[in-house]
Amino acid sequence: MQRGIPTVLTSEELMDKAFGRASKISKRGPTSVDGRRLTALARITASGDIVTSTLSGYVQRFPRVDKKDDFFPQLVDLVIGLDEYKKSLGALNWAAGRVDRLKNETLREIRRSKDVAYIESARRGFYGRMTSYLKQISGDLLFLQDAKNKFRQFPTVRPNVPTVVIAGFPNVGKSSLMRELSTATPEIAPYPFTTKGIVIGHIEDGWHKYQIIDTPGLLDRSFEDRNDIEKQAVLALRYLTNVMVFMLDPSESCGYSMEKQNALLKSVKEGFAGVDIIVVESKSDIIKTDSGNLHFSAHTGENLEELRNIILNKLRNMAAVGNE
Ligand SMILES: Nc1nc2c(ncn2[C@@H]2O[C@H](COP(=O)(O)OP(=O)(O)OP(=O)(O)O)[C@@H](O)[C@H]2O)c(=O)[nH]1
Ligand SMILES: [Mg+2]
């Protein structure tokens, strides 16, 4: 989604580009007045078209964000600011429309004129007013160039592919399970709220490919321990998550007591209300409990196939319900 966003020129750079290109144009006509008129027409057309096509190109190539209650818009809102983002794109659209109209009006005036002084003043007037439109959107252009850089930190997840997210304290065995279930080596993609990135793998049932995601640093701490931005970052994930595997490590070799782990589970349940959460217990080669939760071991492979099938069944149902 962040591919193909162009570098956004500043208003000065855009003016230099437009006027620079225009100033190279020179036309001849049957008379000197005709030559002047043709040159003015061509320069106005060229500079106006460069500005409008550049601005409309930005508007088209920046990601569209319409509805707010989804993963991508939530991230845009958090990292970039949704209202400001929409406002800036709207301002570019506005300026492109204004410049295009001004261009057509000026061309019409000049075509009718035989007065060299009038032609020159109309052209200068066009340059001046176009410059003023561009100055009015200079803040929006800077904002969008900054947004372009921020889009680079967005993970390349596919929001419409059914997704299972793995949660649990550090060291409970999340990465080990990811490795066992993923069909290829999981990829680490940037995520604006954790230096560790999010880990994206795929899990397949022979027909379909689903996403399996580990979020180091995001779902391994209680909700209450987070600042507002982190809370929102976690909630953005909520939109991506169809199924969650919450992992408890009853051996406590991860360094967290079961009491702490259960408290985290409770907090995550609250944050992910409505999400189907599969609670599992890892490291069954060390210890098994009689809690009734599915236990498995990434080391011996105990119950790994069972867990894979439970996950796949749920994801398949999601795909059927969500018709995505
Ligand atoms: N005995 C045993 N150890 C395991 C098992 N799975 C993982 N471990 C060990 O537990 C430790 C943590 O495993 P990871 O898979 O890295 O845990 P994690 O939850 O991804 O940890 P973070 O990335 O730090 O959040 C490692 O030393 C693993 O070897 C298992 O099934 N049995
Ligand atoms: Mg890990």
Image: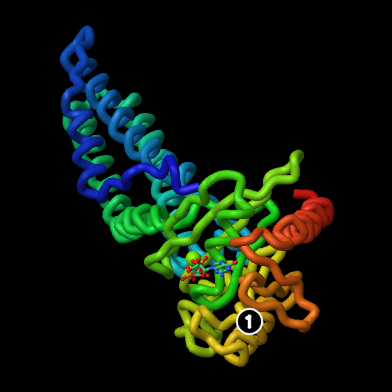
Label 1 sits on a secondary structure element that is loop
**What amino acid type is highlighted by mark number 1?**
Pro
Judge whether 283 appears above or below 265 on screen: above
Q: For the point 48% across and 42% down, which residue is it? A: 60
Q: For the point 21% across and 15% down, which residue is it? A: 27
Q: Quadrant of residue 214?
A: bottom right
Q: Quadrant of residue 154?
A: bottom left
Is the CB of mark 1 within 8 Å of ligand 1?
no
Please name the residue that numbered disc 1 is placed on: 250
Judge whether 33 appears above or below 275 on screen: above
Spot occupied by residue 86 in the image (x, y as percentages of width and height):
49, 60
Spot occupied by residue 256 in the image (x, y as percentages of width and height):
52, 86
Q: Nearer the viewer, residue 135 or 299?
A: 299
Q: For the point 46% across and 78% down, which residue is it? A: 229
Q: Nearer the viewer, residue 215 or 262?
A: 262
The answer to whether 192 appears left or right of 260 in the picture is left
How many numbered marks does the figure carry?
1
Q: Nearer the viewer, residue 318 or 207?
A: 207
The answer to whether 148 appears left or right of 295 in the picture is left
Q: For the point 22% across and 11% down, which residue is it? A: 29
Spot occupied by residue 73 in the image (x, y as percentages of width and height):
55, 62
